[in-house]
Amino acid sequence: MSRPSSAGPSANKSCGKQQQQQQHAASPAAAPAAAAATNAAAISAAGPGSSAVPAAAAVISGPGGGGGGGGGGGGGPVSPQHHELTSLFECPVCFDYVLPPILQCQAGHLVCNQCRQKLSCCPTCRGSLTPSIRNMAMEKVASAVLFPCKYATTGCSLTLHHTEKPEHEDICEYRPYSCPCPGASCKWQGSLEAVMSHLMHAHKSITTLQGEDIVFLATDINLPGAVDWVMMQSCFGHHFMLVLEKQEKYEGHQQFFAIVLLIVTRKQAENFAYRLELNGNRRRLTWEATPRSIHDGVAAAIMNSDCLVFDTAIAHLFADNGNLGINVTISTCCP
């Protein structure tokens, strides 16, 4: 199943107000954009084509100690002894920490399990890595150490037990942000501050409209296969990404998924709410929710159905000549 590329050519663009709302027409790159409404902005749909971070110094304590215990500790003063102890766990290849289960070469050198799978010999002494020898003593020491998050160099101050570290790093707010465009064709990663700059330069087909209340018009919704329509909405000093995605979440059953992402952290996203509304033929379908941070992405929302979900039959009830208009309203939440 193929999808149009987000890097495809964009159609002519123009922005305007209609009944005090802005209207935006999004066209899949696989088909020419049609002028579906007066003063509509036509864009191409964004479709998918289908490093190791240096370790930082740790704050160390015994189990249940003042460094944060089971829930992960906070930052604190780091002594030379702490540096020296945590350095014993540094992988000589990626410089991240070697965490249990800890395996050594025949000479006693350590390498993390991820790097070990890619190596044919020990990176320190060039000796054999087989047979696998488990270092139980170092595993006991690791259980008494609070390791820093690997994103400490970009601002995370948490120190965690080795069992909590991988799970935290998967959702850490300080990890690099990926390109929020749906799909996997763009592999860009960078800081939160660099996301909009990346979108403006690498995804020029995505149009940004100003205002709290706009109409997002997706054209050619009857195209076969999986298709994405994407646009940006700017208001309240922030940038919101609006995504309409058509796919088969369940085999043989095509559905539409509409969601709003916010280019901020999860905590900042809680200060806003959005409403998506389909209107037409004396019918109305509404979804209201808190926008997701781009750290969460579209895939997680679709998997959990945490978005506006409707099938092709419902889409046809609201569509006009294959074009579907979605009213998008952004508001702030009361503190």
Image (cartoon, rainbow, N blue to C red):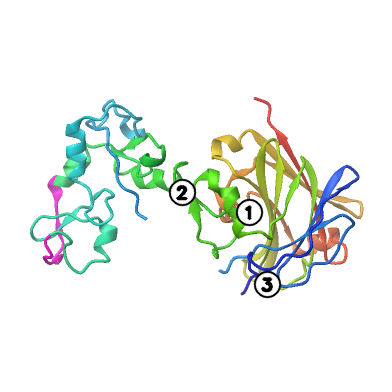
- Residue 42: x %, y % from top left: 78, 60
In the figure, residue 103 lies in which quadrant? Answer: bottom left
* Residue marked by disc 2: 176
Image quadrant in which the C terminus is located: top right
Magenta segment boundaries in residue numbering: 125-137
**Sequence-wise, which precedes: disc 3 or disc 1?**
1
Instruction: Check disc 1: other Cα within 10 Å, few if <14, some if 14-19, many if 20+.
Output: few
Identify the mark nearer the N-term, 2 or 1.
Answer: 2
Q: Amino acid at mark 3?
A: Gly
Q: Badge 3: few (under 14), some or many (20 or more) residues near its Cα, within 10 Å?
A: few
Left or right for 212, reference 122: right
Which residue is labeled 3 in the image?
225
Discs 2/1, front:
1
Q: Is residue 127 magenta?
A: yes
Distance from Cα at disc 3 to Cα at disc 1: 27 Å
Query: What residue appears at the point 24 percent right and 62 percent down from the top-left corner?
Result: 116
In the picture, the disc for residue 282 is none
Within 10 Å of the Cα at label 2, are there few (<14), some (14-19), or many (20+) other Cα atoms? some
Q: Left of 197 or right of it: where is 176? A: left
Ranked by sequence position, the earlier of labels 3 and 2 is 2
Local secondary structure at mark 1: helix
Disc number placed over residue 200 in the picture, else none: 1
Give the spatial CA distance, label 2 vs label 1: 18 Å
Residue drawn 23% across the image and 52% down it: 91
**Residue type at the position of mark 1:** Met
What amino acid is found at the position of numbered circle 2 in the picture? Pro
* Callout 3 secondary element: loop
